[in-house]
Image (cartoon, grey):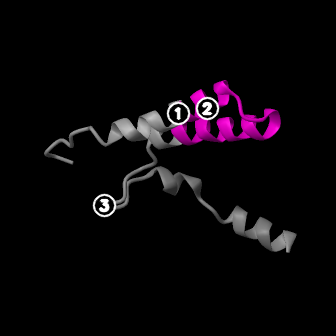
Amino acid sequence: MKHKLLQTLAGLDLTQAFKTKGDLKRWSAKRTIGGLIAGTACNDIVLNGISWMAVVLAAISILPICLSFTEKQCPGE
């Protein structure tokens, strides 16, 4: 099983994830950074228990995604 997993991972081309494919857009920094901060908040809660700092970190992690709903699209996009 481990050999099969390594073969599958060796065949992946991560550069394709960052390229535009038709209507599919590249990875967004808003979602990536927000996800990283959310993961950090979850990890902190698991390790140290819930605290006001972890709650604030979790709230900060959703701000980029919430603010992206208010953005206006350019006519060319």
Return the residue at label 2: 55
Q: Is residue 41 left or right of residue 16?
A: right
Q: Residue at x 78, y 35 (%)?
A: 49
Query: Mark 1 touching mark 2, by CB under 8 A?
Result: yes
- The amino acid beneath tag 3 is Asp
Q: Residue 21: x percent and y percent?
A: 37, 60
Residue 23: which numbered mark, if any? 3
* Residues shaded magenta: 33-59
- The amino acid beneath tag 1 is Ala
Q: Is residue 41 above or below residue 77?
A: above
Q: Nearer the viewer, mark 3 or mark 1?
A: 1
Q: Secondary structure at mark 1?
A: helix
Q: Residue at x 52, y 38 (%)?
A: 34
Q: Quadrant of the N terminus?
A: bottom right
Q: Nearer the viewer, mark 2 or mark 3?
A: 2
Q: Residue at x 58, y 54 (%)?
A: 14
Q: Is residue 37 covered in magenta?
A: yes
Q: Is residue 60 above or below residue 10?
A: above
Q: Earlier in the sequence, mark 2 or mark 3?
A: 3
- C-alpha gap between disc 1 and disc 2: 6 Å
How packed mark 2 is, by other alpha carbons closer than 10 Å (few <14, some 14-19, many 20 or more), is some
- The amino acid beneath tag 2 is Val
- C-alpha gap between disc 3 and disc 1: 30 Å
Return the residue at label 1: 59
Q: Residue at x 66, y 35 (%)?
A: 41
